[in-house]
Amino acid sequence: MLDAAGTSLTIGLMGQPGRIKLPMDACRLAIAAAMVLMLGRYFDAPAAAADRLILRNLEILTDVEVASFDEDGVVLRAPSAQGRARYTWDEIERGKVALDQSRFDELLARLGPPLYQVRLRLKTGDYEGLAEPAERLYPTFAARTSQSAYLVCQAAAWSRIALGRREAAVEPVLRAAALLQSGAAAADGLPGARRPALDRATGLCGELLPVWFDAAAAQAALKGVQEAIRGLSQPRPLAAYVYYVSLALAAGAQEEADRVLPSLSATDPAAAGWREILLAQRDVQAGALGAAASRLRSALPRLEGFARPVALYWLGLAHSRADDEA
């Protein structure tokens, strides 16, 4: 503190105030230095607190504030110069954040590269190549609700179908469809030109009709499909019950299939049609070929959409096996 005459300065030394006699010019220099130091701290504080993100497309986001981040991506306190407030891990190359830097680095290292690989392979149509990154990410994103979760679920579904793992594809198909139905994600956000062939009325996927050829794979798929169905909001889509019952029948779990069959309403035309198809599947597998053929011939005129080709498959199989037994 400068005295009234401006010739001495009080400075705390070892916890005790002490007065030092200084020439006038020296006092003024000391005051100026202190002011510069305080101003420097004032102007440096926002810069030190500002976050910084470097994107894979080489754009640099400076003077942004990261409000939060989790597996689904990074959320900014306010939109960036690009007009966006959310960035997914596949878009980020590296970053410096005031929040938990170690957690940020861990999520970026674990999720960024495989998400980028999924996006790239969807864009190029390499569906078999999707398997490795998609399967690595699926346990993390299966039960989440975001565009990244949809990207991973759809990638897992398409890669499993491409590799002939049709039964295992049912779970991610149901999860992906649920994200679209809820509005948590949009199919237009997928890289590449391919889009899921979903029947809006039933939720069934035209790329995965409910006909199964591997009993062991069907049995292995049941638990995951059941968990996916439990996570669906009410009213659940018809596809959930059709896929589950058809898998249970293919796995030889008839009691489980019979437990769920009543969920297919006899008063709803689409549900009633699929109920007849599933009962015919049960008849064919039990060797009641005549009953299956009669049931399907009666139901066919009322069947629409994906139900018709599935009904024709079981009708043809019933006739073929009957001919073999003749």
Image (spheres, rainbow, N blue to C red):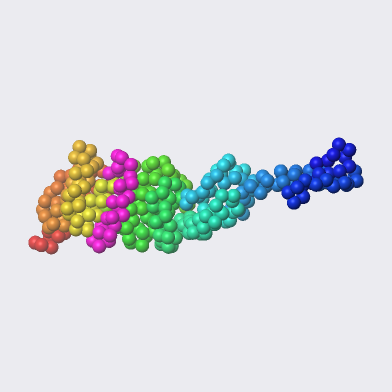
Residue at 42% across / 43% down in the picture? Answer: 184
Give residue 136's position: percent from left, percent from top. Answer: 42, 60
Image check: 289 left or right of 272? left
Label the magenta part by its dominant secondary structure: helix
- Residue in the foreground of this view, choosing between 224 and 265: 224
Is residue 157 in view from this perspective?
yes
Please give the count of numbered marks on the rendered protein: 0
Is residue 155 in view from this perspective?
no
Give residue 146's position: percent from left, percent from top. Answer: 44, 47
- Residue in the foreground of this view, choosing between 220 and 57: 220
Q: Quadrant of residue 1?
A: top right
Residue at 49% across / 59% down in the picture? Answer: 110
* Furthest residue in direction left, as rendered: 326
Is the C terminus in the top left, top right, bottom left or bottom right quadrant?
A: bottom left
Give residue 176's position: percent from left, percent from top. Answer: 38, 49
Residue at 31% across / 40% down in the picture? Answer: 234
* Furthest residue in direction front, as rendered: 16
Magenta-colored span? 212-238
Q: Residue 233 in magenta?
A: yes
Q: Residue 276 in magenta?
A: no
Image check: 111 left or right of 7? left
Residue at 86% across / 36% down in the picture? Answer: 4
- Residue in the foreground of this view, choosing between 141 and 218: 141
Give residue 66's position: percent from left, percent from top. Answer: 57, 46
Q: Is residue 290 above or below residue 80?
A: below
